[in-house]
Image (cartoon, rainbow, N blue to C red):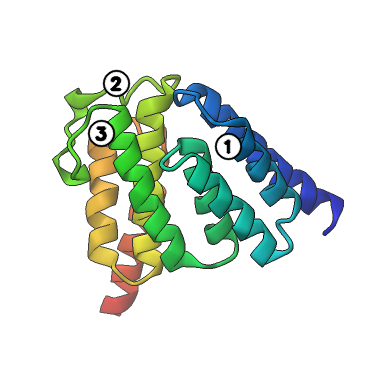
């Protein structure tokens, strides 16, 4: 692995650990060590995934672990597995924010989605964006569109960048018409 790729992976792990601090803390030291080891062994799929799964066993549902799993599957091109983790992230984010379990039922007044400095609602928005994107990539474009429209409802100033996904969907629909 070259230095840039290693540095990028390390940055992602640091982001996950920062999320740990901001998303309620409580990550056991052993789980944190497994996250670090997963990052260091990223190029060795089986070993990295084993460390991620050990972190998950030690801290099930913890945002830092979920983020690590999501990124691993996403960057490895294992999109169906990334989607399963995105669903877990949505469930965890809904719980952290006291939101309805079904993302489609979440309303703008349910959390301070406009306060970009508030990590909990942001975690929900980013989880929903990942969910939308993966739905689109896996061919479930209508489900992806529903999620993107919900993002724009919750984040009307589009700090999360959902409009880009909507543009992709709209362009794909135009290509089909031609």
- The foreground one among 165 and 111 is 111
The residue beneath circle 2 is 112
Kindly state the secondary structure of the residue where label 3 is placed. helix
Relative to residue 138, is residue 33 depicted above or below?
above
First in sequence, mark 1 or 3: give its number. 1
Task: Identify which residue is drawn at 50% across, 47% down.
Answer: 56
Relative to residue 36, is residue 171 depicted above or below?
below
- The outermost residue toward the left is 105
Task: Identify which residue is drawn at 22% across, 37% down.
Answer: 153
Kindly state the secondary structure of the residue where label 2 is placed. loop
Q: Quadrant of residue 89?
A: top left
Tell me where residue 102 appears, x and y as whole percent: 18, 45
Q: Which is more foreground, mark 1 or mark 3?
A: 1
Tell me where residue 22 appears, x and y as whole percent: 50, 23
Give the CA distance from mark 2 to mark 1. Answer: 22 Å
The residue beneath circle 3 is 154
First in sequence, mark 2 or 1: give its number. 1
Report the quarter where the C terminus lies.
Answer: bottom left
The residue beneath circle 1 is 16
Relative to residue 173, is residue 1 depicted above or below?
above
Tell me where residue 139 appears, x and y as whole percent: 33, 72
First in sequence, mark 3 or 2: give its number. 2
């Amino acid at each position: 692995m070259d230095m840039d790729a290693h540095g990028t992976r390390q940055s992602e792990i640091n982001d996950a650990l920062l999320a740990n601090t901001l998303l309620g803390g409580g990550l056991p030291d052993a789980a944190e060590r497994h996250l670090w080891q997963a990052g260091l062994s990223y190029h060795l799929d089986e070993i990295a995934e084993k460390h991620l799964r050990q972190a998950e066993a030690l801290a099930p549902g913890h945002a830092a672990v979920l983020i690590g799993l999501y990124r691993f599957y996403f960057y490895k091109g294992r999109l169906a597995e990334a989607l399963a983790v995105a669903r877990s992230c949505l469930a965890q984010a809904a719980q952290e924010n006291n939101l309805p379990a079904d993302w489609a039922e979440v309303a703008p007044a349910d959390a301070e989605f406009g306060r970009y400095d508030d990590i909990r609602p942001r975690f929900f928005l980013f989880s929903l964006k990942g969910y939308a994107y993966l739905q689109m990539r896996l061919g479930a474009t209508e489900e992806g569109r529903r999620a993107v429209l919900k993002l724009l409802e919750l984040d009307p100033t589009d700090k999360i960048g959902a409009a880009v996904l909507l543009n992709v969907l709209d362009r794909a629909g135009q290509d089909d018409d031609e």
